[in-house]
């Protein structure tokens, strides 16, 4: 199986999606009709209930999970749900998996977070054993060791909270054959104070997580950059804000650095779906729907 991830996708928290069946269907179809070819779902779970709803509602839209947490998502359940969805909607589902964060894993599961690299290896072995192919999974990789594993045991890497410089480093480690799909936060706002306030609020939760802060230090950011919700330098590096030319330029920076696909997460400072910004971004990127987009897909 080969998934066509296109050049640009949308990254959204799973919790931001509507809960009602009809509204989910209409939302997924709207995205497809705008020309988006892939949606990434942050916080998806092994039952793949939301990915299934999006796949069933559309003709061609691809879905990625960003990420399935290896400490909490059972492989047997994932194998069952993945198998059903792959049969019904071939080559449209990509499983992003990763270690999550020690503080959150231990708080929610009571399990000790230890030896994350070895834990990922064991999880990948389990995915092999239940028949989930290497081509159907990517790793949430940031550091060199995990990126190397992504090249060996997955279709590639889905780095989160990164800069084009990280994309360049990741491509060097992955080599030429692996998929590289970084996430990029964007704000369609030209007022610097307003944009940075939205960006800083969105970054706050991540600046307390060592997986991310260690990676940012590797990229040259200092403790001063990480303090107080993030310096302007840090916010501007992690969040692309401004007019459409500025947004396009940042996405192109990732591509020039080696990204195959960029996952754009639109920030507005609200939990509401950014429908207006979806339309503006689609127009600004000159997206075009595939033939048949918006029609109902085949159900399970």
Image: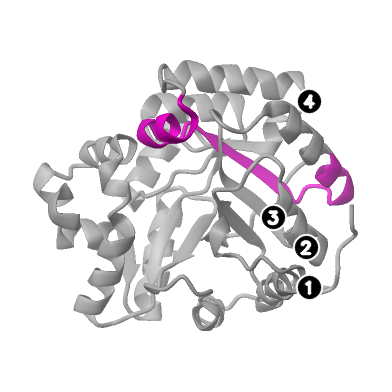
Mark 3 or mark 4, earlier in chain: 3
Queried whether the magenta region covers residue 51, the answer comes back as no
Residue depicted at x 58% and y 16% = 122
Indicate the secondary structure of the residue bearing disc 4: loop
Q: Nearer the viewer, residue 260 or 22?
A: 22
Label 3 sits on residue: 50
Q: Local crowd at mark 4 within 10 Å, few (<14), some, or many (≥20)? A: few
- Vertical arrangement, residue 294 with respect to residue 261, above or below: below
Marks 3 and 2: which is nearer the front?
3
Say left or right for 97 vs 202.
right
Mark 3 or mark 2, earlier in chain: 3
Q: Is residue 177 in view?
A: no
From mark 3 to mark 1, how far is it between C-alphas? Answer: 19 Å
Q: Nearer the viewer, residue 122 or 246?
A: 122
Q: Image quadrant of residue 135?
A: top right
Say left or right for 185 vs 281.
left
Q: Nearer the viewer, residue 273 or 10?
A: 273
Say left or right for 232 vs 273.
left
Q: Local crowd at mark 2 within 10 Å, few (<14), some, or many (≥20)? A: many
Label 4 sits on residue: 131
């Amino acid at each position: 199986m080969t998934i066509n991830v296109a050049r640009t996708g949308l990254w959204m928290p799973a919790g931001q999606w509507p809960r009602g069946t009809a509204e989910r269907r209409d939302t997924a179809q709207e995205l497809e009709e705008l020309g988006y070819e892939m949606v990434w779902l942050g916080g998806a779970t092994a039952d793949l209930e939301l990915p299934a709803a999006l796949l069933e509602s559309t003709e061609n839209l691809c879905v990625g999970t960003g990420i399935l947490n290896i400490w909490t998502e059972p492989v047997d359940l994932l194998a069952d749900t993945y198998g059903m969805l792959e049969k019904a909607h071939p080559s449209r589902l990509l499983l992003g998996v990763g270690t999550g964060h020690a503080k959150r894993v231990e708080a929610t599961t009571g399990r000790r977070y230890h030896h994350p690299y070895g834990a990922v290896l064991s999880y990948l072995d389990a995915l092999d054993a239940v028949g989930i192919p290497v081509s159907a999974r990517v790793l949430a990789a940031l550091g060199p060791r995990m990126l190397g594993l992504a090249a060996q045991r997955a279709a590639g890497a889905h780095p989160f909270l990164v800069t084009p410089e990280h994309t360049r480093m990741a491509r060097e480690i992955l080599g030429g054959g692996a998929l590289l799909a970084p996430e990029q936060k964007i704000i369609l706002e030209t007022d610097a104070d307003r944009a940075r306030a939205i960006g800083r609020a969105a970054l706050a939760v991540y600046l307390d997580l060592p997986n991310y802060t260690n990676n940012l230090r590797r990229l040259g950011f200092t403790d001063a950059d990480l303090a107080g919700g993030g310096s302007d330098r840090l916010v501007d590096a992690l969040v692309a804000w401004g007019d459409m030319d500025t947004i396009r330029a940042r996405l192109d920076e990732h591509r020039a650095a080696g990204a195959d696909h960029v996952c754009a997460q639109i920030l507005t400072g609200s939990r509401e779906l950014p429908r207006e910004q979806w339309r503006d971004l689609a127009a600004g990127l000159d997206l075009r729907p595939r033939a048949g987009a918006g029609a109902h897909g085949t159900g399970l």
